[in-house]
Image: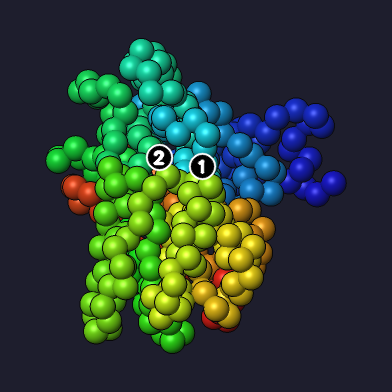
Amino acid sequence: MGKLEAYVRKGERVTIRDVALGAGVSVATASKALNEQGRMTVETRERVQRVAQRLGFRPNAMARALVAQRSFTLGLLTNDTYGRFTLPVVAGLSAAMADRGVSVFLCAVEDDPERVRLNLNAMEDKRVDGLVIAGKRIDRALPIALPPQRMPVVYVNAACPPQGVGFVPDDDGGAYAAVTHLLGLGRRRVTHVSGPRDFEAVGLREQGWRRALDEAGLPVPKAALFGSWSEGFGYETGHALMRTPRAADRPDAVFCGNDQIARGLIDALMHLGVRVPDDVAVVGFDNWEIFAQATRPPLTTVDMELKELGSQAGLTLLDMIDGKPVTEGLQRRPCRLAVRQSCGGQAR
C-alpha cells in the first residue's frame, strides 16, 4: 500500500479530509481545488486533483448540490415509449454529461396529458436543473402545453415553440445526400418511396430527393409513393414498381423514407429475381443499425445522428443553466450517410 492509500481506512469511503491530508492542504483548499474555485497556485490545484484521482475520491452529491444550489441532474421527457428515437438521444446526452458529473432522469410517457403532468411534477420535485423534451416526430409536441418552467428546456426531434431552443435532423439535407450518392454511382431513374404525407419529415425528404435530381438535370421519373412506415408497404411497392411493362420505366434505384420500407422493398425485389444492388440500388433512412445491418444485402441508409443531437441538447442546457447565451429557434443538424452494400457503393 502506497503512502497516499495509507490515509484511507480499509473498506471506508474516501472523504474530502483524506484528500486534504494526502495533498497536505486544508479541507477548504481541497474543496476549492476540486470545484475549480478559489485562488491558489496551479501546482496546488493539480496536486489536490491528482491525489483525489489516485484515492478514487467521489464527492458527496448532496453536499455538492447544497453548495452549488443545483441538483446536477437533467430530466428527459418523451412520448417515444418504444425508444426507437429517444434511446440514441439519451445515450448521447448521458455520454456528454458523464464527464461533467451530471445525471439524467428519464421519464417515458404515452400521449396522455395527465401522465405528462405527473412526470413534470416529479421532475420539479427532484429539482432537475434543466429539461429535454424528446419526441418521435419533428412536427409534434407533447400532448400538453408546458407551463412556465423554473428551468431551461431544450427540444430534440420534436416540435419546438417559436422562442424555444430545439435540435432536429436535417431531413432535406439527408435525402439530398442519399440521392446525390446514388447519382454519383451512375443511377439515373431514382424513385422515392416514403411514409404518410402528414409527417413533416416526409415532405422534407421528398424535397431533398427532388432537389438532387433537379440539380443533376434529371427529370423526376414518377411521383413519390406514400404509404405506411412498414415492411409490408415496402414489399407491396417493390412488386408494383416491377410490374411496369417497359423496362425503361422501372427504377434503377429507390430512395426509401425509412429502413423498414427499404427492407420490405428489397425482399420484394429479391423474390422477383431482381438483383440488389446490380439491377436496382436501394437506400433507406434512419440507420436503425441492428435492422439495417441484418438486411440482405446490408442496407445503405441515412443516419440522423441522434446521439449527436442528444449531446448538443445537453451541452446547450448546461450553457442555459450557467446563464450563457444560446441560439434560439430550431437548428437542423447534418445527417450522415452510412454506406453499405445495398446501393452498390463501397461500404464504409
Q: Residue 314 occupies which quadrant of the picture?
A: top left
Which amino acid, by three-letter code, is at mark 1? Arg
Residue at far left of view:
162
Which amino acid, by three-letter code, is at mark 2? Lys
Q: Which of the two residues, 312 or 246, is positioned nearer the viewer here?
A: 246
Indicate the position of residue 41 as horizontal and vertical percent values: 44, 55
Name the residue beneath numbered marker 2.
Answer: 136
How far is mark 1 from mark 2, CA to CA? 8 Å
Name the residue beneath numbered marker 1.
Answer: 84
Say which element carries label 2.
Answer: loop
Residue at far front of view:
245
Q: Are marks 1 and 2 in contact (CB under 8 Å)?
A: yes
Indicate the position of residue 242 as horizontal and vertical percent values: 49, 67
Q: Is residue 22 above or below residue 185?
A: above
Badge 1: residue crowd in 10 Å (few <14, some 14–19, many ≥20): few
Q: Which mark is residue 144?
A: none
